[in-house]
Amino acid sequence: MMIGIDLGGTKTEVIALDDQGVEHFRHRVPTPKNDYAGTLQTITDLVLLAEQRVGQTGTVGVGIPGTISQFTQRVKNANSTWLNGQPLQQDLEQRLGRSVSIANDANCLAISEAADGAGAGVKVVFAVIIGTGCGGGVALNSGVWVGGNGVSGEWGHNPLPWQDDEEQQFARDVPCYCGKAGCNELFISGSGFETTWRRLGGEALKGRDIMALAEQGDARAEKTLALYEARLAKALAGMINTLDPGVIVLGGGMSNVDRLYQSLPELLPKWVFGGECHTPIRKAIHGDSSGVRGAAWLPRLTL
């Protein structure tokens, strides 16, 4: 049995999968925000609950909104900031009495979709989370590639390439929590989509409401979406020019914008070196379940 934990900023979810990836149990609870000890207890309780319900002990993998430093073995780069600097892996292994695999949530998306999802059978899968934040993960032959610094695929905190004048002003006006300027995340996350709408003079709205206006023909909402599509195409072209994956899989709230799967293939050749791009852009088959499913696969699919 494979037990996976998806540790999010607002909720923490557990899943139990058998060796064929069939789900046997799933449960979620609120994440104890800003409470590291409470987070440890929540994860421990969920693992034990899952094992009680399925009647088996399992391997354990945990997806987090950050990564484990290859040098200090402590959490870094987490936007759930109470995790940063903590020996999460060691603490969980001590509590559970077994080894625990931990990876970035985007890497979990990548291996979930590479194992039996939208990237199944593809040698190199680049998976993108475009939700509240923006992240990426790389799967090679269905195994997660973490990298020597633990930041493989983290293109969300590379600068948006080929910035025009307005995008340069955007980068000056909107700081990124990472301390850098002009990160992809600022432009192509769901939050970035909402920021673009406000910069065009709109009142504060959620992304789904802006999309509803676009579907009704609202000119400002349509411009917001067109800018988002162009910026996402630039960001993905930068990754294609670097990695040239066999498929790009989109997850997170903005991945539910169906128009992206028609517009991106048309926009990408403008930015990909050589003027050609045939990289498939696919929606994550497992949707919101990809992160927790990928966490469960971690102990078996980490390179």
Image: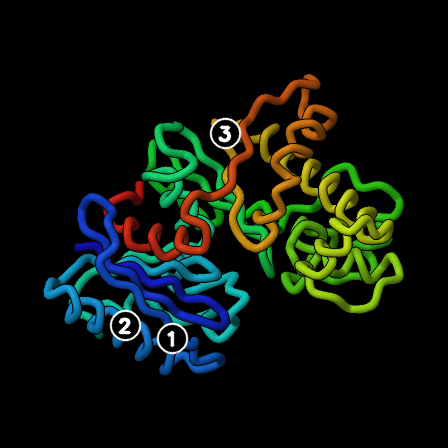
Q: SS for tag 3?
A: loop
- What residue did someone put label 3 on? 245
- Amino acid type of disc 2? Leu
Kindly identify the residue that appears in the image at 76 percent across and 60 percent down. 195
Q: SS for tag 2?
A: helix
- What residue did someone put label 1 on? 29
For the residues marked 1 and 2, what is the alpha-carbon distance in whole angstroms? 9 Å
- 15, 102: nearer the viewer: 15
* Number of numbered discs on residues: 3
Q: Which of marks 1 and 2 is nearer the N terminus?
A: 1
Above or below, 273 against 181 in this view is: above
Q: Earlier in the sequence, mark 2 or mark 3?
A: 2
**Cβ–Cβ below 8 Å for labels 1 and 2?**
yes
- Amino acid type of disc 1? Val
- What residue did someone put label 2 on? 46
On-image quarter of the N terminus:
bottom left
**Cβ–Cβ below 8 Å for labels 1 and 3?**
no
- 225, 173: nearer the viewer: 225
Q: Residues within 10 Å of mark 3 (few under 14, many from 20)?
A: many
Kindly identify the residue that appears in the image at 22 percent across and 74 percent down. 95
